[in-house]
Image: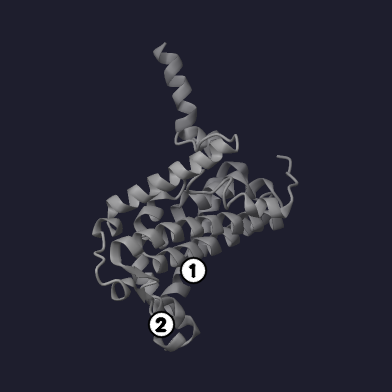
Amino acid sequence: MAEKKTPLRKEFSKGLIAENPVLRLVLGTCPTLAISSSVVNAIGMGVSATIVLICSNIAISALRKVIPNKVRIPAYVVIIASFVTMVQMLVKAFVPAIDQALGVFLPLIVVNCIILGRAEGFANSNPVLASAVDGLGMGVGFTLTLVVMGTVREVLGAGTFLGGAQSLLVLFGENTLNGFNGFNLLKSFPGIVPIGIFVLAPGGFFMFGVLMALANYLAERKGKPKANLGCEGCPMASTCTIQKKQPMEKEAAQ
């Protein structure tokens, strides 16, 4: 497969808006909905996924000519799982509160469609540097989406912003910023009552739908297609057995 030569700046920026993994490619929706109830959790998941994205893209791109085509998907999973394990161990050691908050979703980065999708859709056919930049851009885009959702859900649903920030700041030593642990908006505006549903699952789906609608609106204004929710929008559509099976079933039915 021929390698594509694209400016590194474009490789990075496409993950922010044009090919945002959550809002445009509709990948990684499970952790997006589950973790985005607070900004701190969103940052923890976003940074963890970004590190895995960059490292796995680099490794897979470097080994793309060595890994046999028939076993490339299992090989990608092993590589991704190795980096996820290392990230999880580091999180457990240095920010245990984040590890506890993220729970099972931290090790489940192994099967995150964003990670495997970039490995199959980009890293296996592009040089190392471009793959690293692609991973960084996709990771930043994923993190920004989580932070935006987390900000709205936390402010409206809990009346706080950056609540539990000490769980991240502990990396820089105890009592960082004089014990800063987020903003309690209820103290500043005592008459406001939080809308608790925003920190629950329905609030996550609502915010996801709003951001998806906004992303589609902006895409249409720029003459780009809406986010594809079907199999055709998946980066691995060309290798998916389900995708290949559907046309055969339609022909048999006719």
Report if residue 106 is visible in the image: yes
In this figure, which residue is indicated by the disc labeled 2?
Answer: 180
Q: 63 left or right of 196?
A: right
**Percent x, y for residue 178?**
43, 88
Which residue is painted at 58% across and 36% down in the image?
224
The answer to whether 206 is drawn above or below residue 93 in the figure is above
- Which residue is painted at 46% across and 66% down in the image? 43
Q: Nearer the viewer, residue 204 or 196?
A: 196
In 3D space, how far apart are the residues under numbered discs 1 and 2 (Cα atoms)?
26 Å
Question: x and y percent of residue 167 in the render?
Answer: 40, 77
Q: Residues within 10 Å of mark 1 (few under 14, many from 20)?
A: some
Q: Amino acid at mark 1?
A: Val
Q: Quadrant of residue 137?
A: bottom right
The kind of secondary structure element at disc 2 is loop
Q: Residue at x 73, y 40 (%)?
A: 2
- Give the quadrant of the C terminus: top left
Residue 102 percent across, percent down from the top left: 37, 65
Residue at (50%, 55%) from the top-left corner? Answer: 142
Q: Is residue 63 visible?
A: no
Chosen colour scheme: one colour
Q: Residue furthest top?
A: 254
**Residue 219 location, quadrant:** top right
- Residue depth check, mark 1 versus mark 2: number of the one nearer the observer: 2
Q: Is residue 21 above or below residue 43?
A: above
**Local SS, label 1:** helix
Q: Earlier in the sequence, mark 1 or mark 2?
A: 1
* Direction from residue 249 to residue 117 in the image, left or right: right
Residue 1 sits in which quadrant?
top right
**Which residue in the protein does label 1 denote?**
87
Residue 178, numbered label: none
Q: Amino acid under label 2?
A: Phe
Relative to the observer, which residue lies in front, 157 or 72? 157
